[in-house]
Amino acid sequence: MRTTLKFTLSIAKWLFIFGLVILLAGGWLFYQDISAPLVLSGERADFQIRPGSGLRTAIRDISKAGVTFSQSSFLLLGKIMRAESEIKAGNYEIQRGITLQELLDKLVRGDVSQTEITFIEGWTFRQMRERLNAHPDVRHETRDMTLQDIMRRIGAPDVDPEGRFFPDTYLFAKQSSDIDILARAFRVMRTHLAREWEERQPDLPYSAPDEALIMASIIEKETGRARERPMIASVFVNRLRKNMPLQTDPTVIYGIGEEFDGNLRKQDLLTDTPYNTYTRAGLPPTPIAMPGLASLRAALNPAKSTAFYFVARGDGSSQFSDTLEEHNRAVDRYQRRGRRENPPAGDAQDASAGAPESPSAAPAENPPVIPQTNAPENPLASTPGVPDTPAPASASPNAP
């Protein structure tokens, strides 16, 4: 009896030792599996984990991307870490040298591969959509949507999209929806506008933040040199205060739309549209482009000046003038002399030839101004030496 018990204990002891050896060997092999670099078919591998995927489905998708690894060890690791239902959907990129442990950590964190898209200051919403539609890593949901449908999807159903998105570089996970990217840019613009509105100068001629956004878009399109934004803003704000037409070419061009051929003509300045600031007083009905932060700040914190005019010097900078007489001298110096020396050919002539210059010289002919509803009468109309329709705010040798 004692001998039998001794034999049984001996067998149990050896079985325990054998089992422990097997366990340690298995543990060592498991450790080797999860800590050794995965075998990739190239320097990197890209794969997608679809929403709702479990660990087994993820393993199949990773393997299809040319990654070789111990699937059983990966499953066991997922069970040990209780990560079977914790992996995040998205597009991933891994590089040579990554281990199973690092891969699982990446999937649980949702460390998806990212790309970027850049929207430029001064772009229209049409240009923004073109950039989105051309991006290979964007999931395109808006291509067949109307503008109203797009704005409804981002939560702003009654808002015109022009100028409502902040120009910047946005990082996003590959195959993110264009709706999500637009919604982000919309929220960023809304945040910047609200912050700048709270820090605005007192007594500006805006009744709401939207009007400041419209002005910022004009400043964005009119500015040749960044440091001049506050002065350009000052000219337009001074004109608004006096109920003088802004008479700025970029708004006219925006009103022409896709028919604009690059040449702004006198007839364009005479043709009334809601965006023609030669024929209509006040601000246009919507922004004309996406303004950057500097233009927002300039619109809400313009320079202190008495300037009502500016003319392009031809080097990207502008000459600002307080009076029409000063301005006409500046136009003669920087533009008319150049046009006499290099006259334009054919009908591709500057709109300022015989018409108001954009936006500034005293013209031989001024287009009629159609006041906006409830706009006060022009306080300068009865001032000696000032025409009923003031000269444009700025003059440039060519349409912007």
Image: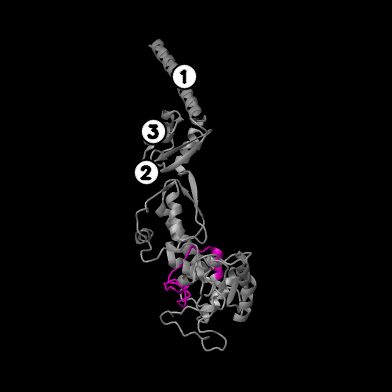
Q: Residues within 10 Å of mark 2 (few under 14, many from 20)?
A: few
Q: Is residue 184 visible?
A: no
Residue type beneath disc 2: Pro
Give whichever of discs 3 and 2 has the lower sequence position.
2
Q: Which one is nearer the viewer's eye here, 244 or 334? A: 334
What's the image's color scheme? one colour
Q: Residues within 10 Å of mark 1 (few under 14, many from 20)?
A: few
Instruction: Kindly report the distance in space between the C-alpha atoms of the residues bearing marks 1 and 2.
Output: 46 Å
Q: Which residue is mark 3?
A: 60
Q: Which one is nearer the viewer's eye here, 361 or 346? A: 346
Image coords of residue 388 (percent x, y): 51, 84
Q: Secondary structure at mark 2?
A: loop
Q: Secondary structure at mark 1?
A: helix
The residues colored magenta run 269-298
Q: Is residue 151 magenta?
A: no
Residue 280, quarter of picture: bottom left
Q: Is residue 354 above or below residue 167?
A: below
